[in-house]
Image (cartoon, rainbow, N blue to C red):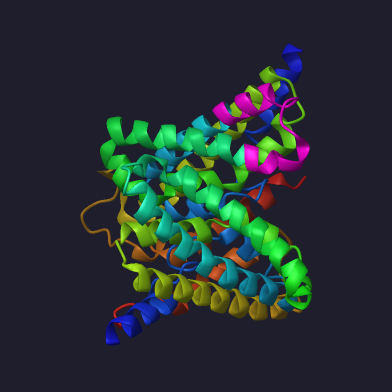
Amino acid sequence: MGDYLVLIISCILINNILLAQYLGNCPFLGTSKRMETAVGMAMAVVFVLVMAGVLAWVIDHYVLKAFHLEYLMTISFILVIAALVQFVEMFLKKSIPALYSGLGIFLPLITTNCAVLGVCLINVKEEYDFMHALVASFAYAVGYGLALILFASVRERIILGRVPRPLQDTSIGLVTAGLISLAFYAFKGMV
Amino acid sequence: MAKTVTQEFVKGLWAEIPPFRLVLGLCPTLAVTKTVEDGIGMGVATGFVLVCSNLLISMLRNVIPSKVRIACYIIVVATFVTVVELLMQAFTYPLYLSLGIFIPLIVVNCIVLGRAEAFASKNKILPSIADGLGIGIGYTLSLAALGAVREVFGSGTFLGNPVFGPSFQPFTFMVQAPGAFVCLGLMLCLMNLAGKK
């Protein structure tokens, strides 16, 4: 049990997927200007990342490793993610329309969110067993959501401030992300 | 004809240079620019994928049905990324190790898919190659520049050779994650300043 706790803390805080491993930065900067979009994106990431992490583990274990097709990993994972996103979209539209309209356009965007493919690849590289892969995917997704929502709340304040012209928008966003990342850096050495 | 091809090539070097003018593909930009060498390696790998995928997608642009075009583009890109991955594993093994999972992640680099969707799917083969080549070289230059700044200040070396005297204290902030964000943000600011007339 303690094993899982350490894994969760290290995935959420220490190896935060956004701020320490630099994955999923384009939607991070793109959707963090307003709180609603940030929350929508965070929810969509949690939803898809857990499913993709589990599915990628199953495929890696029972198809790729079983038939020595490891070199097809990139292609098969990205196809699985693209198909999964499409499937989730159709499923939600039919059965949980409230959640579907909440996630809105963020679902299709997730296919090109490198955090999703990144976590699938990290799970394979770290050679997690099934439960560890599941827990790690979930914890990484929560870490992504946490960083995104924190960042969005800072960014909503920045809009009110007077930022020099050349620094505006993405530029100040990156500097802010650096400072938040510095705060997360303090968790290093905790585990 | 020749003029437009040159134009497509040149625009990737300044007017639309990624990731500054075209704010796409930030993850590898932040992750692999600890040293100049990694930056150049990543830029060349991405450039290769970009040229090949632009070429193929431009050739197939009348065949691919528009409803499933994104999935088709992803398969084309993923194929070339696998090619690059195997080539790097065979010929530049140390670079392959230091770039790590960011080589397979070229698949989801928005620059590659972005060019496929915005350019190669609408243009002839030659301009598409020129576009891929220009954007690829522009990306390599940006990564090398960012890598140079971070390597010189962060570890006091350039391409592995020390630039400062032995009394230099490395500014390690630069080679770590927070430094990557701040450094890219400040470079973007400088680009905005330089671009303003």
The quarter of the rendered structure image containing the N terminus of chain B is top right
Quadrant location of residue A62?
bottom left
- Depth order, front residue of A114/B174: A114
The residue lying at 45 percent from left, 35 percent from top is B45
For the question of whether residue B37 can be seen, the reply is no
Residue B4's x, y, as percent? 75, 19
Q: Main secondary structure of the magenta part?
A: helix
Magenta stretch holds residue B65: yes
Quadrant location of residue A125?
bottom left
Residue B138's x, y, as percent? 57, 35
Placement of B95 over or under B156, stated as above or below: above
Magenta stretch holds residue B96: no
Residue A15 relative to residue A101: left or right: left
For the question of whether residue B144 can be seen, the reply is yes
The residue lying at 29 percent from left, 31 percent from top is B90
Residue A35's x, y, as percent? 72, 78
Residue A169's x, y, as percent? 70, 63
Give the magenta range: B52-72
The residue lying at 67 percent from left, 21 percent from top is B59
The residue lying at 39 percent from left, 66 percent from top is B173
Q: Which residue is farthest left?
A: B166
The quarter of the rendered structure image containing the C terminus of chain B is top right
Placement of B79 over or under B168, stated as above or below: above
- Depth order, front residue of B38/A95: A95
